[in-house]
Structure formats: C-alpha cells, structure tokens
Image (cartoon, rainbow, N blue to C red):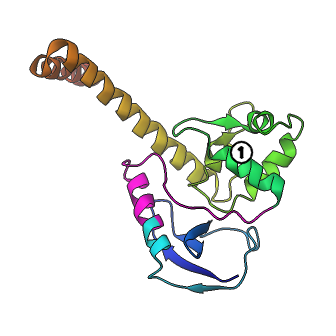
Amino acid sequence: MSYVYKIIDSPIGKLKLIANGSRLSAILWENDKPNRVRLGPIHEDKASPILAETERQLNEYFAGKRNCFELELDFAGTEFQRKVWEALLTIPFGETRSYGEIAVQIGNAKAVRAVGAATGKNPISIITPCHRVIGASGDLTGFAGGLGAKKMLLTLESGVKKDARSAFSHFQMADSLGISEATEKLKEVESSRSSNNKD
C-alpha cells in the first residue's frame, strides 16, 4: 500500500497531510514523535486532489469558517483504536469530552487508560478531534501536537461558537424588532461596553 504526502503551513505550525488513494490517512505534527503513526511506503505528491481538498478545508477551519469536515478517512489501527477514533468524530465542535465519557460511549467504561492510549495514537489530528478530549477534572492532558496547540484549537473553536451564538441572538432580535431597530440595540450594547472599558 503506497501513501502520498504534502506539507502545509498552518497557524499552529507545519502539518504533514498523508493520503492513501482518495482517502485521508494522517495529519501529523511538525514535532510528532517518530513512529507514533505507522504507515507504509510514502512519497511526496503536492498535486494530490485529496490532499489539496484537505488543505482547503483546514484553511477554512482555521479561518473560523468551517466546523465540520467532509473527507473520506482511512484509519489504520486495531479494531479498538478505530472504535475510539470513530467516537472522537462524534464530539461536537466547540465541546469537550473526558476519556471516561469516551470509554462509556464505546461500551467499555473500565477502559479509560486504553482510551487514552488510543487517543494518543490518533493518526488524523484536528479532523478526528482528539484535542476535544480532556481529563476528568477538566485539565488539558497529553497531545501529540503539544498542549499549546491543543489550547489554541480549543480556543479557536470556543471563539467561533461564541460568535455564532451572538449572530443567532442578532437574528432573533431582528425577527422580533425589525432589522434597523435590532441593529440600533446592538450598537447601544457595544457603546455601553466601550464606556465600561474606559472607566
């Protein structure tokens, strides 16, 4: 089985995109540990359509314009690992889950440590959102890309979700008050915030 790769720049460092045919197989970090993800022979292909599409969707994600990905994934791992990775895909954008919650979700509540190990082996970072898995106490835990990258991804998603809620509130207000009146109300709120910040 032959794989192709392409290295791209991102707000959190260089990312190595790897594909097998028309499916995405891995997104690796610049500081990834050797052999964390084991694949077959690999060669560079900057013209790969699936890698170009992955780059496009990642750029939209980092720009706050995408909260889900539409790509075919090629998970190379054990049955248990694939079950964990598929569970990660169900964590909503801007939310988090604990390792214990993932263990319960896959029907093996006692497998918390095994879930942690499988999460650490997740080959398709960001798109399979292992960054949304945190410790039971709410602490950020180990992450292949580093805790700084994990925090940045969670902060990005939290900010996008907050902006979406603000926009939704605006639309609700517009529906009940009318567009012009709703806009004036928002201006009043922003003006009040600015005054408070100056005081």
Picture quadrant of residue 180: top left
The residue most toward the right is: 110
**What residue would you read off at disc 1?**
141
- Expressed as whole percent of the image width and height from the top left, the position of residue 2 reads 66, 83
Residue at the (49%, 53%) spot, across then down: 69
Q: Nearer the viewer, residue 83 or 197?
A: 83
Magenta segment boundaries in residue numbering:
54-77
Q: Nearer the viewer, residue 84 or 150?
A: 84
The quadrant of the rendering that contains the C terminus is top left
- Expressed as whole percent of the image width and height from the top left, the position of residue 29 reads 61, 66
- Name the residue type under label 1: Thr
- Expressed as whole percent of the image width and height from the top left, the position of residue 27 reads 59, 66
Q: What element carries label 1?
A: loop
Q: Which of 40 and 156 is in front in this view?
A: 40
- Expressed as whole percent of the image width and height from the top left, the position of residue 155 reads 49, 42
Q: Does the magenta stretch include residue 57?
A: yes
Q: Is residue 155 above or below residue 10?
A: above
Residue at the (40%, 39%) spot, across then down: 160
Residue at the (24%, 17%) spot, across then down: 173
Badge 1 local density, few (<14 within 10 Å), some, or many (20+)? Answer: some
Q: Is residue 187 magenta?
A: no
Seen in the image, is 13 located left or right of residue 62?
Answer: right
The residue most toward the top is: 176
Residue at the (75%, 59%) spot, across then down: 121
What is the magenta segment's predominant secondary structure? loop
